[in-house]
Amino acid sequence: MYATILVPVDGSDESRAAIEPAVGIARAVDGTVHALSVREPLEYDLPPDDAETIEAEADRRSREALTAVVDRAEADGVNVVSEQRTGVPDHGIGDVVDERGIDLIVMGTRGATAAATGRAGRRDRTRIGSTVERVLLEAAIPVLAVPSDGPTWSDAGSGTPERIVVPVDGSALARESATHALEFAATVEATVHVVHVIDETRLALDSVSQRLSELLREGAHDVIEPVRFDAQDRGLDVRTDVRRGVPAAELVSYAEDVDADLIAMGRRGGRADDRDDVRRRVLGGTAARVLDQSNRPVLTIG
């Protein structure tokens, strides 16, 4: 289902985290990995010797980053092509997506710039870097964001995810995203965990009647059941659950509880939250928070 997989790299540990998942998926779907390194031009004037030294070092890092992808893909017998460009990273990524008909972007949650500026250390605030953030906002295709500090698919002896959490909220967008996630799960023969979170931030559940609480749970099962039936029709092993609380926090906790290898969810969500900032409204409040909080790969769709 992903014939062409783009892996942007910059030589950082964060970007290298994307290589294994990208190669594993490409091997499973008989796809081609497109390795891309976009070097940002110098933004200030320097003496010629200094500028040349900095450019040479950036070029070396870029070539080494591409070589790491090529070597890993070739070791697994996966088709791979590589390219080095100069410009704004997210623009370069967008250009390659359009030019090559890319089906999936796999990238680290942060890059070298975020790490160098100290953003990578602010774990309590955000996990994703500015380039990934802009790609998520602009891309019309699925994006797999891979953190460098969490469990890897190879830890379980597989190059693809074995347990995938699929959140559903009853919206058409979430249902479409779930269908895409199930197609991917069937491709890699993963177990699917379909979960709905009753959002306590929208309703004071502690004060509602027992009857209303029962109705909410019945409604949650009504949301889950079509996805469960779809998964079973595809021959998938499927588990379901309903939770209560703050959606993003519950999803991150649930993924840890079931030792998920991947969370696959809609990028923009079914409902906008006026309390969120512009980035979160566009991405969807829950998706943005899961990306911020989870140390597991997150596939955003739509």
Image (cartoon, rainbow, N blue to C red):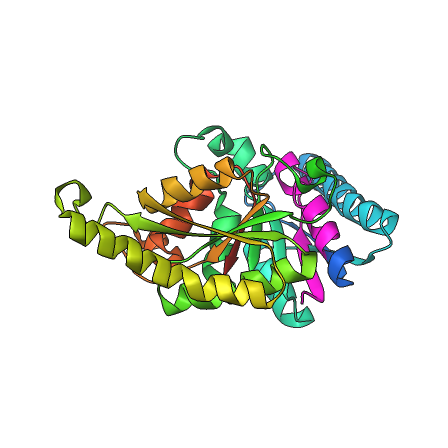
* Residue 60 showing in the rendered view: yes
Residue at 61% x, 66% y is: 234
- Comparing 30 with 188, the one in front is 188
Residue 9 inside the magenta-drawn segment? yes
For residue 171, side relative to residue 192 (left or right)? left
Report x, y in % for residue 281: 32, 56
Percent x, y of residue 105 = 61, 57
Residue at the image point whose x is 29% and y is 53% from the top: 217
Of the 4 image quadrants, the one containing the N terminus is bottom right
- Is residue 140 shown to the viewer in this render? no
Q: Is residue 276 left or right of residue 233?
A: left
Q: Position of residue 207 (x, y in %)?
A: 12, 42
The location of residue 34, given as percent across then percent down, is: 73, 59
Above or below residue 275? Residue 102 is below
Front position in the image: 89 or 124: 124
Magenta stretch, residue numbers: 1-25
Q: Please give the name of the residue rendered at 49% of the width and 42% of the height, measured from the top-left corner.
A: 128
